[in-house]
Image (tube, helix red, strand yellow):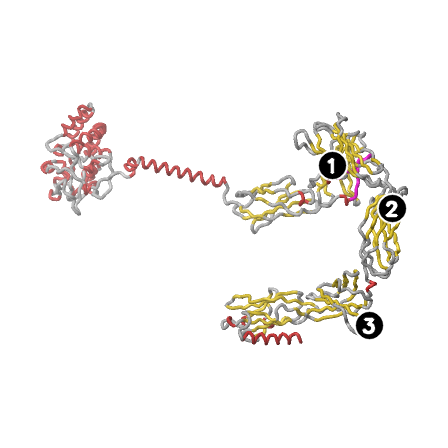
Amino acid sequence: MFYHLIWMLVLLCRSSAADENSVRDVEIFPSSPEIERGSTLKLFCVLGKHYMPHRNASHIIWKLNHELITQENYNIVNETVSSVTIHNFTYSKAHVKCFIKYLGKEQLLVHTEVKSGFPPDAPGNISCVYYFDAELACSWTSGRQTNLTTSYTLYRKMMRKRGVTILNTVGSSCQSKTESCSFYYPNTPYSSSFCFQVKAENVLGEASSDCVPIAMEKIEKFEPPEILSVQKIAGIKQLLTVTWKKPEKIIPSQDLNCRVRYRNLYSNFSETVTVNLTSGEKIASLNLTGLWDSTEYAVAIQCISVESKFWSDWSRERMASTEEKAPSEKVDLWRVIESSHSAGHRSVHLMWKLLNHFPSPGRILGYRILYFPENSAALKMMNITTDEKIILLLNEEAYIISVTAYNSAGDSPEAILRIPSTDEKTSQIIETVRTFTANEEVAVEWMSSRSEVTRYVVEWYEELEPDPFRRSWQYISNSTNWRTNKKTFRPFICYNISVYPLYGNKVGAPYSIQTYIQEKKPSEGPMADTGVPGKNEITIKWKEISKDKRNGFISNYTIFYKPEGGKELNETVNPDVLQYRLKSLQANTQYTVHIMATNEAGGTSGEPKTFKTLKFNKEDIISIAIPVGLSMLFLLVLWITCILKKHMFKKVCWPDIPNPAESIAVEWPVDASVNNSFLRGVTSEDKTIGGLEDVCVLEPCFPEEHEDSLLMNHENRISEYTDINTKVMINRDKNIPYNEEHEAAKHLSASMPYTMTDQDFRSQVLSALIPAEKIQPIEMLEDYLHEHQDVSNQNEENKEEVLNLSDLSEKAVFNPYLKNSVNTREFLISENLAEHSKSEPKSQSTAISPFQQNVVGQSYVTLDMFGLATAH
């Protein structure tokens, strides 16, 4: 409650300041508050005056960690101040945001971070360590976590005992944010009357510990002593003498206790000896007895005051060995032969290790390497090294190599190894190798085809390890299996294990396998590459997972693919397959695909990738393109043909038909028209036959030069049909009764369609060729046609005679309309028709000049019409 009253007072001060326009545009009070967990939190949001009058405090909304706080917790203080109350605040840390909502939109004004915690507990378990004339460091425990920023103050006080009252406080203090604090020289006086107190405080309160008295001599800690020497005594075996110096920075006149630790470097065995030193002794020594011969030891010392409870740290170890003797065992020697990296040379990585035999051969000073060609022993070369490895550059010949370890007492036996020549071939003696794990051990077993081979070398190394010197090996005798602790191998790493047979001084061909001692699912999945999709299929490709991410042997790959909105499908392939074609996919559909790599421990999927199948494939495009292409080609050829043959197509499809109203004909002589019995018959019978009034007969108007061509074009046809058709026409005319002719003519009109026969055609041609004034009765016309047939059968040289026969007193000129007619019709009138026409008044017929234009409402009759009427 007091907390809330304080913030209300702050609110009033801030509100008055806001009225004076001295605050920022928007503020939240309090800013970044820290409250006790479970209490009530009240915050105020203050708007600047520039938000008025369109927006005010009623438009303010509050959110707690993106969640809207209910309106019932809001309170409008005035037009510019809105508050919110949050009950039972249990968040360790939360964000409260102030928004203004105007016209349906939310705008963030300001936010603050609210923390909740607890007031501090009283610190306890105060302990200190005193480094003489250097540092006084104390530490304590703070109790439960407050979740708020808490500061600590360490007080050092001088006590004078009168009961339990602290009379006065002298000294100094130090502050810290952690649970430790230190006083440094020179502010580290030595006294036995100090007590130490720690006060913790945060925004919610403070708490102090009791003042704990601590005597300085009880907490003193020395620097480690300095070892001056560790040496052996000549002529005495199994003994070392250790000499050291007391620390310089210690409280004067104190007795010390020191511990001497010595351990065998070739085992985990160590022992400790305690030595008491008086305050007057500055240098101390100790003889270590019962040691092993020719064994190296490490020696370290620590000391403590007899009144203190803190030992010093161990001193730096010093190395020494007992009386030495020559190494009794040869080194364990192996090699790794690299391929030739230059003409005639190759690198041989030679490595060895000491055998773990006790007692140890003592300190090894170095190793001597001798090597020479197998066929030239006199060409010996030597190298000396202190390392347990060396690289020899050899040629293509076979070499013999020996390694000897030596110390001050002598040399070890030689370890000999033969390096084969580059062209030397060895047979495969090892038939099979297998590994398995059982009872926290890794077992390697193999089978040999030669029973006389009794020695083998098992070599193992990480597949991704490029350094040949990081390989491990083990010699095995009289056995075809090898077991070692599982901890020899690292889990989830692929190892290459090889077994070499040894016979004599030769090393046979190895048999190698790969193995994982322990597997887990791959660290990452393969990344799919979809390539170019088709209509119903796609090829999915992926790369192998890198060896360091496999964590086991990949047993298979699974391709998962799912159409948009459909069911997920999958396909599983062998581990050696790195691409797969998905078939039977839906056309024009989006798919999501990912690939999972699986080993014995589980599977891991790669990142998904999307692709969309095509709507048409190549076959569809070809099946569409070929007909379209052929159609276009056909249309192109047709278009070109139409252009080249347009005149021919025009004549066939759109023949020129002259307009009779625009025809120009040569005027027929009036006398010939009146005297011609043929025309008189027509004009006298026009009412009876077809009711044709004002009939105009158009003469042909061809020029003279076209007569020959017209005769030549029609001569053969006329002569062919003249005899037969003339007789038929005569007989037909004789047999048609008058009433029938009248009935036929009665239905004839200028607008009626008619049918043209061959007889019509011959009639029109003959009427065009025979002058109008020479038209005779049928009997005379028959004789004339016989004569004309005889003339047409003559040679072309006699064609002019035919023209002369038709050249009468009044020359007939062809009509242009008849020129374009397909067939020229002949107009023949029977005797009965002629007699009938005489009884009709002649006033109904009027002859119009051939060159006179046809007037409106006036009919005209061409030779085609007359021929049609007579024929029917």
* Secondary structure of the residue carrying numbered label 1: strand
Q: Which mark is residue 240?
A: 2
Labels in figure, total: 3
Where, quadrant-wise, is the C terminus in this rendering? Answer: top left
* Crowd band around label 1 with a 10 angstrom C-alpha radius: few (<14), some (14–19), many (20+): some
* Crowd band around label 3 with a 10 angstrom C-alpha radius: few (<14), some (14–19), many (20+): some
**Distance of label 2 from label 3 (alpha carbons):** 53 Å
* Residue 516 x, y percent position in the rendering: 72, 42
Res. 43 in view = yes
Q: Which mark is residue 203?
A: none
Given this view, does label 2 or label 1 mark the residue nearer the observer?
2
**Distance of label 2 from label 1 (alpha carbons):** 34 Å
Residue 430, by quadrant, is top right
* Secondary structure of the residue carrying numbered label 2: strand
Residue 693 lies in magenta, yes or no?
Answer: no
In the shown orientation, is residue 437 left or right of residue 742?
right
Given this view, does label 1 or label 3 mark the residue nearer the observer?
3
**Which residue shows up at 87% across the image and 53% down it?**
284
Where, quadrant-wise, is the N terminus in this rendering? Answer: bottom right
Q: Which residues are magenta?
A: 472-485
* Secondary structure of the residue carrying numbered label 3: loop
Q: Earlier in the sequence, mark 2 or mark 1?
A: 2
* Residue 520 x, y percent position in the rendering: 70, 47
Q: Using the image as rendered, state which of residue 50 and residue 378 is in the foreground.
A: 378
Residue 674, by quadrant, is top left
Q: Earlier in the sequence, mark 1 or mark 3?
A: 3
Q: Return the residue at label 3.
A: 160
